Amino acid sequence: MDMLVERLDEKLQEWEPSTAAEVRQRVSELIDLADEGLLEIMRSRAVEQEVLDILDEPVSR
């Protein structure tokens, strides 16, 4: 079994039921996006954070 699958399986058992349900839903959505070839157009949290950081930088003159 893939290490990621093993880790996910362990974590789903450790987390609160509501957290595990949310993770299951999001993973399911990611699988659907990957099946449709749409992952490249989905913004990652890292990219969103980079943009927010740039917007928060003070304007230098």
Image (tube, rainbow, N blue to C red):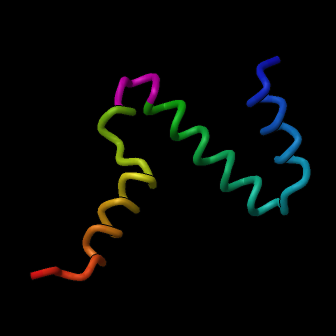
Residue 56: percent from left, percent from top = 30, 78
Q: Residue at x 37, y 52 (%)?
A: 47
Q: Residue at x 35, y 69 (%)?
A: 53
State which quarter of the image contains the N terminus.
top right
Does residue 35 belong to the magenta stretch?
Answer: yes
Region rendered in magenta: 34-38
Residue 23: percent from left, percent from top = 67, 50
Q: Give above or below for 4 relative to 53.
A: above
Q: Residue at x 33, y 69 (%)?
A: 52
Residue 12: percent from left, percent from top = 83, 47
Q: Give above or below for 2 relative to 15.
A: above
Residue found at the far left of this picture: 61
Direction from residue 49 to residue 29 in the image, left or right: right
Chief secondary structure of the magenta portion: loop
Q: Give above or below for 31 relative to 2.
A: below
Direction from residue 51 to residue 39 in the image, left or right: right
Q: Quadrant of residue 33?
A: top left
Q: Residue at x 66, y 56 (%)?
A: 22
